[in-house]
Amino acid sequence: MDTLKFADNILMDPQTFLIFDSLLVVNDKYGEFNISVINMNSNELVARLAKTGRGPKEIVQFGGLFEGPGQREFCILDIKNSSILFYNLDSINIKKNEWIKRKDLKLGNGQTIFAFGFISDSSVVGTGINQNGRYMVYNFINETLIEGIDYPNSEKERDINHMFKGLAYQSYICSNIRNKKFVSATLHGDLIEIGHYKTGKLSTVKNLGSYRTKYIINGEYRFEPGRKAGFCSLTSGNKFIYALYSGHTFEEYGMEVRLCNTIFMLDWDGNSVKKIITKEKIKSITVDDNEKMLYALILAPNPMIVRYLL
């Protein structure tokens, strides 16, 4: 294990992150800004981005940091506006706190995407709240939306509102443009689902896990006594999937329930490759382009990045 340390006050409250060569792009709330870009070699701040507000270059509701379809490209989701904002690290726009393009998701009433991944340069697969399936594929060119794949464990037999289902089955999601596959991992359980998009249809490749969710009548999710927390981070490359799993209970771990030391490594057919157990309590993970190093964010005593040789 190798440790990448940062000067005091560079990282404030980091949540998720991506790494592009020597640049760290991190979801780290700093005043009105949601994203920080840091040069890991010089330990200098390059830019702060994604300012919350109502202006033309601001976002209303920050919904997460995601990989983009291009080289050195990342995206931010504005949930309130159903918009995806594209940033490129080689563009001068980055220093002006400006995105290079914006794509609006023209969704129907009651539809919301919480997380997404690109399955082509012009299409994303997302998960969130949707009446006609757990996943949605949106094409930006012809503005079409394809829905599909039911919730697991015969959820369609249970008379539960689709909004409650979407909240209970909130998931991280990653995708593989090469083979048109995607993977989701639930926050509130041990479910991993690998899906495939081909010729306008969504299908399941493999379902892993045994969790059956519990719903609260007002839509608020709570764990039952002894119920274990689920996945805390998800990343992938062209070869493998890496899922950071808690498996802890709130009764035992309290606020540290989502700090984890178990990483499941799978191939894109859902076969187990290996299980990694770390000494460190990890907040989130990301893998480099060559899948030689796995980077992890740890918070104690101060935020830092560590990396493991795969």
Image (cartoon, helix red, strand yellow):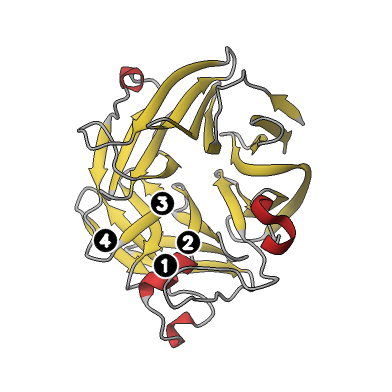
Identify residue type, mark 2: Gln
| For residue 122, side relative to residue 116 (left or right) | left
Residue 4, located in which quarter of the rendered image?
Answer: top right
Residue shown at 44% from the left, 65% from the top: 167
The picture places residue 8, in percent across and down from the top left corner, at 61, 20
Residue that badge 3 annotates:
116
Residue at 67% from the left image edge and 48% from the top image edge: 259
Return the residue at label 4. Answer: 145
Q: Furthest-top residue in view?
A: 42
Picture quarter with the C terminus: top right
Q: 164 or 66: nearer the eye?
A: 164
Q: What is the CA distance from the residue labelled 3 to the residue labelled 1?
A: 14 Å
The reply to whether discs 3 and 1 touch (Cβ–Cβ < 8 Å) is: no
Which circle marks residue 170 in the picture?
2
Q: CA distance from mark 1 to mark 4?
A: 17 Å
Q: Is residue 163 above or below residue 181?
A: below
**In the shown orientation, is residue 226 left or right of residue 194?**
right
Q: Quadrant of the N terminus?
A: top right
**Crowd around label 3: few <14 · some 14–19 · many ≥20 (10 Å):** many
Three-letter amino acid code at disc 1? Gly
